[in-house]
Amino acid sequence: MENIDVSGGSGAIGSAFLSELAQKYPRARIHSLSRSPAAQAPAGVQTLQVDYLDENSLQAAAEQVAGIGAVDLVILAGGILHTGDIMPEKSLRELSAEKLLALFTANTVAPALTAKHFLPLLPRDRRGVFAALSARVGSISDNHLGGWYSYRASKAALNMFIRTAAIEIRRRHPEAIAVGLHPGTVESGLSQPFLRNAAPDKCFSPQYSVSRMMAVIDALSPSQSGLCFNWDGSRIDP
Ligand SMILES: NC(=O)c1ccc[n+]([C@@H]2O[C@H](COP(=O)([O-])OP(=O)(O)OC[C@H]3O[C@@H](n4cnc5c(N)ncnc54)[C@H](OP(=O)(O)O)[C@@H]3O)[C@@H](O)[C@H]2O)c1
């Protein structure tokens, strides 16, 4: 891989992707997209500050990333489960427009706009991968527990967006692969309030989760574009 882009680069999983990729591809040009100008990135990784809701900002970043040509790998590692006073809903009574809009904005609108500007940068003549971090709880058929309305719905919408974009992008980029990835339960600021419910052997370090997701990415084929995969490579039903 010669040209790599990771958004959500300041997050636990995003920064683990950057470290793994910088180590695995020392000669690649790697960009980290982040809302935070001070986001720490490994040596050799260039950070670009972006506003994911401002298309001028995304386009400027895309132009910079595309500077040497097509992008081999685009990882979207941003997203929220809780923010400020907003926590996942346990009941319909806890729903509000504010919560729904906050979760959809971060988990669906931001990745969709990022995809608008970065998916077309995948190579037209060779394999390229676009992988957005989704979540198993975004699977409609796998929802047996309920709760977490806004998070589940925003990730289900993200999965539909990925599938729709995959259909369009394959017309001009026949070897492109666009997928959703579930990282497992991973230690991070996002998961921290909920980790006491997780069995210790089911809670991964960001480094371990990323190493497993990289193996999944490396094994994907264009016929799998539009689908969603677990960290172990198994398919997650829509
Ligand atoms: N941790 C888990 O157990 C787990 C499980 C399933 C799925 N996931 C998914 O994995 C992804 C990464 O999660 P993480 O655990 O690494 O979380 P994290 O450490 O909290 O990082 C999330 C990153 O998302 C970006 N972000 C934060 N607020 C945002 C907003 N309002 N709008 C857009 N971007 C925002 C930030 O990166 P920048 O400012 O640098 O862009 C932030 O560092 C998320 O999509 C999450 O849903 C995580």
Image (cartoon, helix red, strand yellow):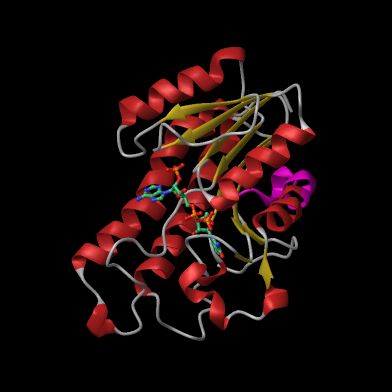
Residue for point 27% across, 83% down: 92
Residue stretch rendered in magenta on the structure = 215-226
Q: How many marks?
A: 0
The answer to whether 191 is drawn above or below residue 69 in the figure is: below
Seen in the picture, residue 184 relative to 163 is either above or below; the reply is below
Residue 110, image x and y in percent?
38, 45
Q: Is residue 5 visible?
A: yes
Residue that extends furthest to the left in the rendered view of this protein:
97
Q: For the stretch drawn in magenta, what is the main secondary structure?
A: helix
Residue 219 shown in magenta:
yes
Q: Which quarter of the rendered picture does the C terminus lie within?
A: bottom right
Q: Is residue 56 left or right of residue 26?
A: left
The foreground one among 147 and 179 is: 147
Relative to residue 229, is residue 171 drawn left or right? Answer: left
Residue 167 position within the rendered picture, expressed as x and y whole percent measured from the top left: 54, 44
Q: Is residue 142 visible?
A: no
Kindly identify the residue that appears in the image at 44 percent across and 33 percent down: 38
Name the foreground residue: 56 vs 209.
209
Is 183 positioned to the left or the right of 114 in the image? right
Q: Is residue 194 above or below residue 80?
A: below
Asked if residue 151 lies left or right of residue 75, the reply is left
Picture quadrant of residue 83: bottom left
Q: Residue at horizontal 65%, vertical 56%?
A: 206
Question: Which residue extends farthest top?
Answer: 68
